[in-house]
Image (cartoon, coloured by chain):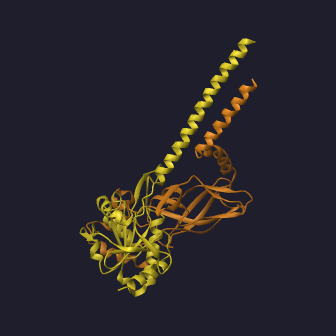
Amino acid sequence: MSTVAASTVGNRRKLLTIFGLLLLVLVGLGIGAILVTRAQNAKPKSTIPLGGPTTSGQGSLVQPPRQLSDFSLMGPQGTPVKFSDLRGKAVLLFFGYTHCPDFCPTTLVEFRDAKRALGAEADKVAFVFISVDAEADTPQSVAAYAQNFDPAFVGLSGDPATLAQIGPEYDLYYKKREVSGASSYLIDHTAITYLIDRQGRLKVVFPYGTPASAMATDIKALLAQP
Amino acid sequence: MNQKRSWLAIIGVLTLALLTACGTPAQPTATAPAASQAAAAAPTTAAGGSPITVRDPWARPTAVMGGAMGTPSAGMATPAMSGAPMATPAMSGSPMSGSPMAMGGKVSAAYMTISNSGGTADKLISATTDVAGAVELHTTEVKDNVAKMQQVQSIEVPANGEVQLKSGGYHIMLLNLQRDLQPGDTLTLILTFEKAGKVTVTVPVRQP
């Protein structure tokens, strides 16, 4: 009898140890999960000062407007394209990459429709798409990509150094993620549309999903300003 | 002995909890047998009163190179490009050329509404098409102004309900495209559902 009791105690200890270990593993997993989620959700802090809503109600006014630095990126013809070359035109700008199957084409279709809605006034606006995937996107391929939506659209390949330099002014965030599967990588990126006035000042930001009609309304309002 | 049993039960519960905490790894093993059974039982087409129907499918044109795709006026893009020191027309025809030019935009996405008239929920678990080297199910979300895309294992189609695959939500991502997709083209997409089996859909290519 006593030996049976002893072995039960022994078993109990063993089981307690296993239980304790399992508990540790669970707690560890929990902490790990929280840390991973935090790391994934690490978001850039917004530095763009926002005022009230725009005329359309769908964008936000940048208040005070932010004077943007000039920069140049290699154009499709092998000559640099300077941002300040666009001065004199309002600029509607989006950052993305050509392997992006959803957000980027969706936004560029809104750009196309906004341009149509503007009619003759569209000549006073440059529609610009800058790639954050310089490894895969050449100046030629980004230019062609943008022109697929409208022949007048400007597509530029952003080299990392230039993006690092101008990024903070746009709250630009982008991060390449290696993934298993055929896509091999995906890029998380800021999906804001920027409206810049003819003097190169950031005046309005639109969240992702802003319809073309709202963009057109706010572009018209911008063009009507002196 | 009773004590031992109760400890074993606790360990069992904990192990289960652990597996649940890990989530996805546990799920596929649980559902895979059911899926293969269903696939084996169901015929390969939607004929014969499949509860699954697909509405308004469409796929985005690819934007590999400028030229004869996109809006009708997009042909205007080509003259602007011709000054570039690149053999533009030749490139677009050779997807496997490995040049960075050919890599640009060799993806597309297909969208549709999938309805389920059956009394039990079903799941879209995979899709294939001969125009793409690989097909994945993806979901997208925008958080704090950052756009994020994520591969998913399946897309649930609720019982007596529908799921929309649309911009900003779910889409079927077509990768390693074997040819350009131009507006007016169609492609054949074979969807595999966990219960309903295979459903073949003809998907027109167009700009939204």
Quadrant showing the N terminus of chain B: top right
Q: Is the residue A88 above or below the residue A183 in the image?
A: below
The image quarter containing residue B18 is top right
Q: Colour of chain A?
A: yellow
The x and y percentages for residue A127 are 38, 75
Looking at the image, residue A144 lies above or below residue B5: below
Give percent across and percent down for residue A169: 35, 66
- Give the side of residue B89 with respect to residue A118, left or right: left
Q: Which residue is pictured at 52% across the width and 47% down the height?
A: A34
In percent of width and height, residue A200 lies at 32, 75
Question: Between residues A165 and B47, which one lies in front from this camera angle?
Answer: A165
| x and y, in percent, of residue B10 in the image | 68, 33
Q: Nearer the viewer, residue A9 or B93?
A: A9
The tint of chain B in the picture is orange
| Residue A107 can be seen in this image | yes
Residue A31 in the figure: left or right of residue B55: left
